[in-house]
């Protein structure tokens, strides 16, 4: 099965979140692998290979739902070790800005997603809630 370049780049963005605070905690890698296996449909071997080669992506999701999904996955990884660092929060802000989210909305969105991730909210519920507010 061929992996789309887009999906692989999105996944590598998530790996960058693991690296954000300079310490790779096993819990963060567990969440990263879970997302890769369950949501993206990658194999453990594919993830191992990409983590070892660790390229950076230049992917910008097109749909608003994709942008929120990736930012939420980053929030899940940020909380995986039970602590949230400024570096992790700042990385989420940088990605939100890169994804074209309005400057004045970034802090509120990032805080919202981090709160939802801390409480293990379902991604679909978050996307639905955000869509209903627009």
Image (cartoon, grey):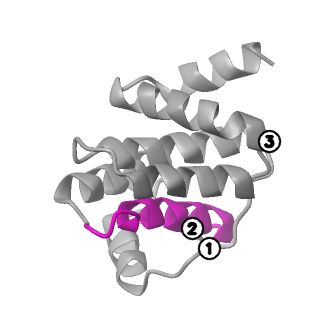
| Residue at the (57%, 47%) spot, across then down | 70
Which numbered dot is residue 27?
none
Q: Between residues 73 and 24, which one lies in front from this camera angle?
A: 24
| Residue at the (54%, 63%) spot, across then down | 13
Say if the magenta span includes residue 20: yes
Judging by the rendered image, the residue that carries numbered circle 2 is: 8
Q: Could you give the CA–CA distance between mark 2 and mark 1, rounded to whole angstroms?
A: 8 Å
Instruction: Mark 3: give few (<14), some (14-19) or many (20+) Cα within 10 Å.
Output: few
The mark nearer the N terminus, 2 or 3, is 2
Q: Is residue 16 above or below residue 109?
A: below
The mark nearer the N terminus, 2 or 1, is 2
117 on left or right of 92: left
Q: Main secondary structure of the magenta part?
A: helix
> Do labels 2 and 1 touch, CB within 8 Å?
yes
Judging by the rendered image, the residue that carries numbered circle 1 is: 57
Q: Could you give the CA–CA distance between mark 3 and mark 1, rounded to whole angstroms?
A: 22 Å
- Residue 96, x across and y down, in percent: 67, 49
Q: Which residues are magenta?
A: 3-23
Judging by the rendered image, the residue that carries numbered circle 3 is: 102
Q: Nearer the viewer, mark 2 or mark 1?
A: 1
* Helix, strand or loop for disc 3: loop
The mark nearer the N terminus, 3 or 1, is 1
Q: Nearer the viewer, mark 2 or mark 3?
A: 3
Q: Is residue 57 above or below residue 93?
A: below
């Amino acid at each position: 099965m061929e992996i789309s370049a887009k999906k692989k780049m999105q996944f590598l963005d998530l790996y960058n979140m693991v690296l954000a605070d300079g310490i790779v905690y096993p819990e963060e890698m567990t969440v990263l692998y879970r997302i890769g296996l369950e949501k993206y449909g990658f194999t453990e071997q594919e993830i191992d290979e990409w983590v070892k080669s660790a390229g950076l992506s230049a992917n910008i999701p097109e749909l608003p739902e994709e942008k929120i999904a990736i930012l939420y996955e980053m929030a899940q990884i940020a909380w995986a070790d039970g602590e949230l660092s400024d570096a992790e929060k700042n990385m989420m802000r940088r990605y939100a800005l890169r994804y074209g989210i309005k400057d004045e909305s970034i802090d509120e969105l990032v805080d919202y997603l981090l709160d939802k991730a801390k409480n293990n909210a379902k991604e679909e519920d978050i996307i639905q809630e955000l869509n209903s507010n627009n």
